[in-house]
Amino acid sequence: GESVGLHLPTLSVQEGDNSIINCAYSNSASDYFIWYKQESGKGPQFIIDIRSNMDKRQGQRVTVLLNKTVKHLSLQIAATQPGDSAVYFCAENTGGYNKLIFGAGTRLAVHP
Amino acid sequence: EAQVTQNPRYLITVTGKKLTVTCSQNMNHEYMSWYRQDPGLGLRQIYYSMNVEVTDKGDVPEGYKVSRKEKRNFPLILESPSPNQTSLYFCASKITGDYGYTFGSGTRLTVV
């Protein structure tokens, strides 16, 4: 697989536990945020998004929380499964539709 | 199947030898973009295109060229590759006015 995970922080969880992946973003004017999942050997895949006028958004087994006061974003994965093992990126939109800035990523390792 | 297709997946070349990485999407997206991904740095935008014959520089354009002669294709050209262009490259597309990208599977380029 691709070695995108080198030098990344790693979160290790047991299968069935809940996972929380955190992201600090840089621009207080950012109005839109996305979480992407990148499995080994694949390109990033969209998971969930949230606009800056919201604090929380839920999807299937995933929840994104936004704290604009401290410029913090988190992704919660319920009942983590082995298939959730991947690198997770947050991205912020800093202006217009062409200014997505990606974070460095966090590797999630799920153990049986 | 809606997808972004990049070729080749892996490429090893020598310094100074011109190369082209192809990218094609079948979703009729107006907007296409190239990113490079390096350990610890996340995804950084190289060039983007808002439509046919409309291209612009991203954050790290030096040493790269692009063209957009057809809506579906957006090749990345390295006229004289150097070792610091060794990286994992992703092509992505989206609908103009939307935020979320569809990414290709990546091209691992090594320049020796």
Image (cartoon, helix red, strand yellow):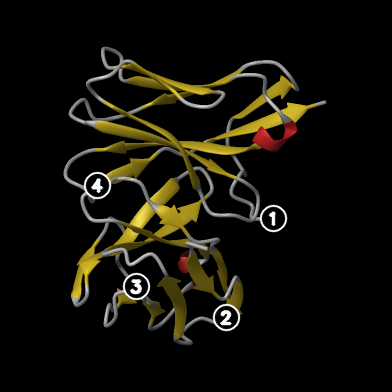
Chain bearing tag 3 is B
Dots 4 and 2: beta carbons under 8 Å? no
The answer for which chain carries disc 2 is: B
Residue tagged 2: B13
What is the quadrant of residue B22 in the picture? bottom left
Q: Position of residue A56 (x, y in %)?
A: 37, 17
Q: Nearer the viewer, residue A52 or B72?
A: B72
Please, which chain is the residue tagged with disc 4 on?
A
The residue under label 3 is which amino acid type? Gly
User: In the displayed structure, does residue A110 sit left or right of residue A32?
Assistant: right
The residue depicted at 40 percent of the width and 78 percent of the height is: B78
Q: Which of marks 1 and 4 is nearer the N terminus?
A: 1
Q: Nearer the viewer, mark 1 or mark 3?
A: 1
Residue lying at 53% horizontally and 54% vertically, measured from the top left: A43
Q: How far apart are marks 2 and 3 (CA)?
A: 15 Å
Horizontal side of A17 relative to B91 (left or right) equals: right
Give me the C-alpha separation between circle 1 and circle 3.
26 Å
Residue assigned mark 1: A1
Mark 4 and mark 3: span between their CA atoms?
21 Å
Whole-angstrom CA distance, mark 4 to mark 2, is: 31 Å
Are discs 4 and 3 located on one and the same chain? no
How many marks the image carries: the answer is 4
Mark 2 lies on a secondary structure that is strand
* Rendering coords of residue B89 (x, y %): 48, 63
Q: How crowded is mark 2: few (under 14 residues within 10 Å), some or many (20 or more)?
A: some
Q: How crowded is mark 3: few (under 14 residues within 10 Å), some or many (20 or more)?
A: some
- Residue at the spot of label 4: A99
Name which residue type carries label 2: Thr
Q: Which mark is residue B63?
A: 3
- Residue at 24% x, 47% y is A99
